[in-house]
Amino acid sequence: MLRGGRMNASRNGCLFLFFLLSLLLPIKRSFSATDTITTALSLHDGGDETIVSSPNGTFELGFFSPDKTKNRYVGIWYKNISVRTYVWVANREAPLYNTTGILKVIKPGILVLVNGSNGVVWSTNSSRSVNDPIAQLLDSGNLVVRDADDGNPLNPENSVWQSFEYLTDTYLPGMNLGWDFVTGHETYLSSWKNHEDPAPGEFTYRVDRNGYPQNVLERRSVLQYRAGMWNGLRFTGSPNSRHSPFYRIGFVFNQKQAYFTNQLLGPVLTRAVLNQNGVLERWIWIDRTQDWILYLESPTDNCDTYKLCGAYGSCDIQTSPVCGCLDKFEPRHPEDWLRADWSGGCVRRTALNCTEGDKFLKYSGIKLPDTQKSWFNQTMTLEECKALCTKDCSCMAYSNIDIRNGGSGCLMWSDDLLDIRVIPMGGQDIYIKVAASEIVTQEGSNGKNGKIIIIILPLLIGIVLLSLILVVYCRRRKKGSELRSTGTSRRPSYNYEHSNENQNDEIELTVFDLASISKATNNFELKSKLGEGGFGPVYKGVLGGQEIAVKRLSQTSTQGPMEFKNEVEYIAKLQHRNLVKMLGCCIDGEEKLLIYEYMPNGSLDTFIFDESKSRLLDWPKRFQIINGIARGLMYLHQDSRLRIIHRDLKASNILLDDNMEPKISDFGIARCLLGNEIEAKTNRIVGTYGYISPEYAVHGLYSVKSDVFSFGVLVLEIIKGERNTKFFLHDQGINLLGHAWKLYKEGRSLELLEPHLSSTHTMSTSEVLRAIHVGLLCVQQRPEDRPGMSSVILMLNNEGVLPQAKQPGFFTEDNGAYCSNSSTTRITITTLDPR
C-alpha cells in the first residue's frame, strides 16, 4: 500500500508539473509573437526571447553577442535576413557580461535594462509621465515607449521616448538626422569601435549647424568629409544623392529645428551605415540574390578629403595632379604645389579693391564651399543676394540656397572658400568676387567697342574660312599624312575602313610627329625595347626630358586599327591614379604609336612569376597592389564618365610605378556599356586564356562581373606566385582555382601563400586569409554570385564576416581541365596574349 501510495503521489506530482509547464509554454509562445514589452511582461536573456515588429515582422529585438565576444547587448536586427544585420544597440557603452539581463518597462514610462542583481545597466529618459507604459517595436525599426491607451503608435507625438532619436551607426528610412534647437538634442550617427564592440568609435556623421546646415563626417571631432548642404535636389558634395530609386530625401529647416529625413519609395529594405573606417555606405537588400548590395559610398575618392586643395583650390579627380587653382587664382606657395603639397591653397592673381568696385565671376559645376562661416537668407532672390554681397567688402562669394524653379535664397561667404571640387554632372553655380580688371566686360558694346567688333568679326571669319580651305587642300595633297604634329593638342582622325564610329566621338589628344618619337627611342633600337605584347613591341624613350614608353603597332600584331582606336579613345577619357596615363599618339602612314608615362618597375608578372624578383614583393606590397587594382577597376565600372569593361585584366597588363603602385593598362579590347546596360554579347571572344570568365568564354556574355572574375584569378596568382594556366596538381587533377578552393573548404587556405612570405614578420595572417576568401568570391561560377568591386574593396579592408564562397568557374576534380556547360552559341576565341 505504501509503495502504491508513493507511485500515485509521484504520478500526481508529474501531472501537476506538466500542468504548470502547459501554463508556461503558451506564455513563452505568446511572448515570442508579440511586438510589445509591458510592465507585466519583461524580456529576459538566457533564452530565445525576442519581440518582433508588426505588422510585417521586419525587425526583431533581443539580446545578442557580437562576433567573437561573450558580451551581451540589447539590439534590433532584421528578422528574416540570414546574415544578422544590426541596426540599433541600446547599451552599446555598457555591456552585460553574462546572460542574466532583463529589459523591462517601468512607470512613469522608462525602459530599463538591469543585470542579475537588479542593478541598472542602461535606461531611457522621459520628459513626461504615462499611466500604462509599454515599449513597442514598429515595422520601421523604431522602438517607442508610449502609453498603451495613446492611440496611433506611428505618431511620434504619442511616444515619450523613441530609438529613432538615439541612433547608433545605422540610418533607416523614417529617421531624422539633425537638431532640435528648442531642446538642444542632436540626432547623429556614430560608428562602432570595431566588429566586436558596438561602443561609439572614432567617426560621426552629423548635421553641422554652424552657418547654413550641412552634412559632415568627422573623426574625433575633426572634419574629414562634407556631403555639403541640401540645395533642394541633392547634397552639393554628393551629386548621386538625388538619384536614389529607393528613397526621397527631405530637409526641414526653421527656427525650431534642422534635420534631414527620407521617405521610402518602394517595398525594399535599405539602410545607410557608418562603418568603423569612416565610410558611409548605402545598402539595399535584393531578395533574388539573398544578399545586401552596396550601391553608394561616401567619401568616394581623394577629392572628397576635406579642403585637400586649400583655400580657392579646386579638386578634379579626372586630372593629374588632382588639385588646381580656380580661374583667376594662383598657388599661394608655388614651390609647395610642385611637391604636391596643396594645403596652402590659392590666392587671387589680382588683389581685390572694394573702393574701385570688384566684380563677380561665375563658376559652374562645382561642390559649394564649406558653409560653416556662411551667412544666409532663405527668402532673398539671387539678384538681391548679389547686390548685398557687392556692398559688403568682406563678402567673397554668393550663391542660391535652393536651385529648384530657377533658384531662391541667398548664401554668402565672408571668408576663404574651402573644400571645392569639380562635379561635372550635378555641380552648382557660385559667383566669386575678383578684381574688376580680371573681368572682360561687354560694357560699351554699342559704342567704340561695338564698332571694333563689327570691323574685326568679318575679318576673323574670312581668316578662318581661308584656313579651312588651305587645310583641306593640304590634306588632299598629303593623302592621309595629315596627322603630323608639332606636339600641341589636336584631334587624331580615325578613317579606318572597318570603323563604324561617328566622327563626333573624336577626342582631344596630343599628337606627336614620327620624327620626334623616333629620336626619343634612338630610332627604335633594340636596346630601347622593353618587351612585346599582343599589340606589338614597347620601347623606352626620353621626350622633352620625360621618360616615356612607346607601344608600336606591328604588322603581325593580333590587334589592329580598331584596337588602336579603342585604346586611344578610352585611355584619353579616363584619369585615375591606378590607370596608366597616356601622353599622346602618333599616326603616320602605316606607323601607329601610343605614348605613355614610363613605369620604371615594368609589369606585375615579371615580379610575381619570377623566383628571385618575387622576393622583392613582401605581403604589404602585394596587398597594396591588390587594393590598387581593385580601386582602378571600381573606377572603370562605376566612377568614371564611361562604364568600361576591360576584358583583358591580367598580370602582364598591370604596370608598377617607382612606388610599386599598380596601374591598369592595355585597353585595346575594352568595351563601354551604354545607358542602363548591365551586360553585352559578342560572337568574338577576345582575351587571355586563364583569366576569361565562364559566361564570356561559353556564351559570349561580358559585364563588370567578367572583370571581377579576372580580378579574382589575379588575386590568387599574386598570393600564390604562380600562373593560373601553369599551375596543375597531377595527383588531384585541379588547377590553381581548384587548389585554392579545396584548401578553403578544408580550412587550410593559408597554405596557398607563397612559402617565403609566410616566414616574414610583415605578413598579416588575417589579411592573407581575407584576400584569398575575396579572390574565391570573385571567381565563383555564376556572375550574380560575384561581388561588385566596391564590395570587394570593402571586404578587403574590413574584418567583417564574409559570405561563404561557392565553387569557382572552370573547375573539375576529374581531370583538372577547364570545363563549362555546352552552348549552341557560335563563338570565335582569340587569345591576344598567351602570357
Image (cartoon, rainbow, N blue to C red):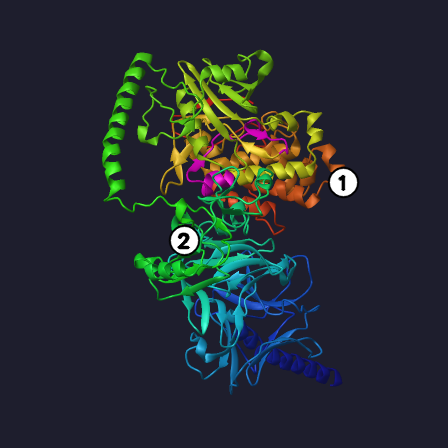
Nearer to us in this view, 269 or 273: 273
Disc number placed over residue 117 in the picture, else none: none
Which residue is labeled 2 in the image?
356
Bounds of the magenta segment: 633-660
Assign a secondary structure to mark 2: helix
- Which residue matches tag 1? 761
Q: Position of residue 664 (x, y in %)?
A: 53, 32
Q: Residue at x 29, y 47 (%)?
A: 443
Residue in the image at 46% along x and 38% along y:
704
Quick check: can you spot residue 294?
no
Q: Amino acid at mark 1?
A: His
Look at label 2 and name its amino acid: Glu
Q: Quadrant of residue 815?
A: top right
Mark 2 or 1: in front is 2
Q: Earlier in the sequence, mark 2 or mark 1?
A: 2
| Vertical arrangement, residue 418 with respect to residue 408, above or below | above
Q: Nearer the viewer, residue 381 or 103?
A: 381
